[in-house]
Amino acid sequence: MADAYSPKLSRRAVIALISVLASNFSMDDAEAQSAAEFYKARRMTLITAASPGGGYDQYARLLAVHMPRHIPGEPSIVVQNMVGAEGLRAANYIANVAPQDGSVIGGLSRNAGLVKIYDFDKSAVQYEPQQFQWLGSPQQEIGLVIINAKTGVKSAADLKGREIALSSTASNSPTSIYSRMLNATFGTRLKSVEGYQGSQAALLAVERHEVDGHISGGSSAAFRGRIAPWLASGTASVVLQMGMKRDAAFPAVPTILELLEKREDKGLFEIGFVEQVMGRPFMVAPKVPADRVAVLRAAFDATMKDKEFLAHAAREKVEIDPVDGATINALIDRAYGAPPDVIARLRSLTR
């Protein structure tokens, strides 16, 4: 006679239990693999938040060509574009849907790191920037304020005292954020015209005189190529730079940090410019095993020094000024660790 307290499992329950156990064994086997074993002949995916043809996409495709040589097992890397919500769609997917085994790399928008500091709709941000494991960025960026010559604006001081319409992609894009910050600290009257699909469309709006100008979050080769004829002909000019330092291509144009007088105002931009240092950031999901993160970070760093990679970048006129992943994680931690009153003021200025 069977023990009255012995549980009886249905056939469906037994099958479910076997499936769970098999899954656990599979995960244990995967985690037990060395990096070389895991990556050997593997097809990796690099998900970029950018549309094809732009600066972010260009860096992603360069990395996909050259980084595999520096990963044990030499896997292939296939680029997948996942555009939407100023980069949030890709970031959310990598954090919550994509495999977290080191087979998926993300190439995110630089504003993905500080999005929760700016306190945008938190229901749309389904990840914690500090938990991402950043691999690095091939370029540290400096934003440019570009104004059509027909406005009569020739310097940063000329931005004050009159309304200037600027093309922008979305309210959480650098163009819109920097405009609101400049209005509150520098006395400008910048108006963001949002809804343009990417930087090239935003620049086309300047060319067509739909707007007076544009503030860029960075300046890719494609971006510089687009504005070069304007600058050469004098139909537009760069009147202000948004970053920690001056771009070498515009040595006579000041940064906003040089023009602001109040220390508290400068402090706000120093937090915001963490994005500029992040440049074109690449990362992996929070739960990727530490040994694989170490392998991918080392591979990224090695790629940044690779002669073939640098030669390829030079041919495409892509600038390389890398920052490593550990530095990006530290910068983000520092930004989120700022005093509450500083973050509160930043939020009040950028919403």
Image (cartoon, rainbow, N blue to C red):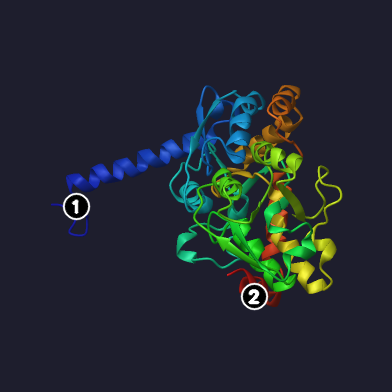
| Left or right relative to 314: residue 33 | left
For the residue pair 271 and 292, the one nearer the viewer reads as 271
Kind of residue at badge 1: Lys
Kind of residue at badge 2: Ala
Q: Is mark 1 on a helix, strand or loop?
A: loop
Image coordinates of residue 261 in percent, x first then y, are 84, 71
The residue shown at (54%, 31%) is 33
For the residue pair 245 and 325, the one nearer the viewer reads as 245
Image coordinates of residue 27 in percent, x first then y, are 45, 39
Q: Which of marks 2 and 1 is nearer the N terminus?
A: 1
Q: Is mark 2 on a helix, strand or loop?
A: helix
Name the quadrant containing residue 243: bottom right
Find the distance from the CA under tag 2 to the CA under tag 1.
Answer: 58 Å
For label 2, the residue is 344
For label 1, the residue is 8
Quadrant in the picture for the C terminus: bottom right
Vertical comparison of 141 with 79: above or below: below
Q: Residue furthest left?
A: 1
The image's mark for residue 280 is none
Image coordinates of residue 215 in percent, x first then y, are 66, 55
Few, some or many C-alpha atoms within 10 Å of disc 1 (few <14, some 14-19, many ≥20)? Answer: few
For the residue pair 24 and 277, the one nearer the viewer reads as 277
Image coordinates of residue 221 in percent, x first then y, are 68, 36
